[in-house]
Amino acid sequence: MQTFLILLSRIALSLLFVLGGFRLTAAFVDEPPAYEFLNMRSEGLWTSLPTRVDPQSAAYERIAPPPDPFPFKFRTGPKLRVIDGANFHLGGVEYHLVGAPLVERTQICTNAQGRRNACGLKALKALDNALRGRLVECAIDGLKANRHLVKCRVNGQDILSLL
């Protein structure tokens, strides 16, 4: 029993020396600087109550959004008229897809085996299926012969890759 009491007193004495050393060290060390974002007495950034914020007094940096690469947006509907595989008419304006191969509606093509197919109608229907009833985003690239030259995408995918 005596050895147990000696061991217990040595542990208590060691603990006393360690805590005393911390206390003595803290007396000689300067206080850390108080940071405003850690100060609990500062004005709260978050609140559970609706608070009016004055944008003029806020010192936050305002970052402009990046420009939209496809600013011209429209939803196609029953007024869409596809002319051929590269041109369509909507709302009294005619559009031409830049980079699309010009395949006339009446064009007939032959494959490697010599078989004929209606590639003009297939191209027209492919463009009609890609556009009909969807939200189309376009970038106007110019104007040529009363047609707007456009680069368009549907659901973030380029229309030319869909064709």
Image: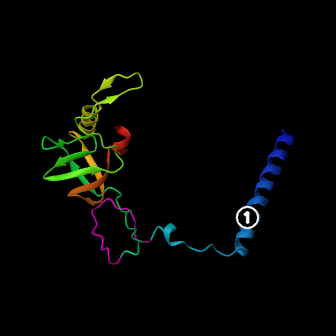
Left or right, 16 with reference to 3 = left
Q: How is the image coloured?
A: rainbow
* In the image, farthest residue toward the front: 114
* Residue 49 inside the magenta-drawn segment: yes
Q: Quadrant of residue 66?
A: bottom left
Query: Which quarter of the rendered picture does the C terminus lie within?
Result: top left
Q: Magenta stretch: dominant SS?
A: loop
* Rendered view: 68 above or below 111: below
| Secondary element at image label 1 | helix
Q: Give x and y (percent) for residue 132.
A: 21, 39
Tell me if residue 134 is in the magenta stretch: no
Which residue is located at x 28 percent, y 55 percent? 149
Residue beneath the point at 27% across and 69% down: 52
**In what quadrant of the picture does the N terminus appear?**
top right
Residue that numbered label 1 is attached to: 22
Front-lying residue, 142 or 58:
142
Residue 79 figure quarter: top left
Residue 122 sits in quarter: top left
- Tell me if residue 130 comes above or below residue 99 in the rendering: above
The residue lying at 30 percent from left, 26 percent from top is 117
Whether 54 is drawn above or below 139: the answer is below
Residue at image position (79%, 60%) is 17
In this view of the protein, which residue sits in the foreground, 43 or 74?
74
The amino acid at mark 1 is: Phe
On screen, residue 83 versus residue 19, left or right, reads left
Residue 144, image x, y percentages: 26, 59
Between residues 25 and 81, which one lies in front from this camera angle? 81
Spot occupied by residue 153 in the image (x, y as percentages of width and height):
33, 47
Q: Which residues are drawn in magenta? A: 42-57
